Amino acid sequence: MRRAGSPDRYQPAGGSTLAVNRDGCPQRVKVLLDANALMMPAQFRIDLFGEIRELLGSFEPVVLPGVLHELSGLSRAKGGEGAAARLGLALAGQCTVAEGDSTTLPVDEQVIAWAKVNRGMVVTNDRRVRDALLTEGIGVISMRKQKKLEILRK
């Protein structure tokens, strides 16, 4: 048992300002969240950021302006979907807003284009987006059994 004032001999002195991710890389992994990913906490009662942190370690959550626009449109609805979208907008406030290349593209295409350029991971439950990203060799984080998130790679 260790006393409160004694140093832990297994911890290096000084400490790092940036946590190392699971792959041992000191840079944070960029993780793009799409609209249905931001709605998962309300729909499936999961801790989205906690689950991603458990899978990857240190990460930087990113959201596209098109996703924010989609969520704001969905948030006007009544019922469960509107409430999930409102919670998604609140969670998006904790994310970095990325620069979208083209707002004329559909949001799903913007997500795929961003992932190709930035080579980050994407959190989505959309099957079409997930399959397109996997064929490009981009890692996807998706829901498993409506309880946990898992990393998919091809």
Image (spheres, rainbow, N blue to C red):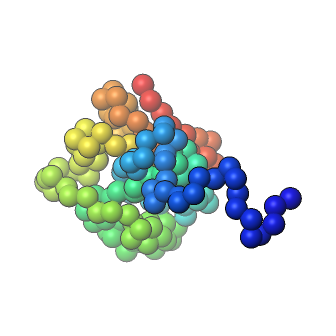
- Place of residue 36 in the rendered image (x, y in percent of width and height, measured from the top left): 43, 54
Q: Name above or below for residue 112 compared with residue 48.
A: above
Identify the residue at image location x=25%, y=38%. Answer: 116
- Quarter of the figure with residue 113: top left
- Place of residue 152 in the rendered image (x, y in percent of width and height, measured from the top left): 48, 33
Identify the residue at image location x=40%, y=57%. Answer: 61
Q: Name above or below for residue 43 compared with residue 108.
A: below
Q: Is residue 153 left or right of residue 106?
A: right
Q: In this view, does 86 lie to the left or right of 138?
A: right
How many labels sit on residues?
A: 0
Q: Quadrant of the C terminus?
A: top left
Identify the residue at image location x=49%, y=48%. Answer: 20
Q: Name above or below for residue 43 compared with residue 27.
A: below
Q: In front here: 122 or 19?
A: 19
Q: In which quarter of the image is the N terminus?
A: bottom right
- Place of residue 148 in the rendered image (x, y in percent of width and height, measured from the top left): 61, 46
State whether residue 147 appears in this view: yes
- Quarter of the figure with residue 88: bottom left
Q: In front here: 26 or 84?
A: 26
Residue that sits furthest to the right in the current view: 1
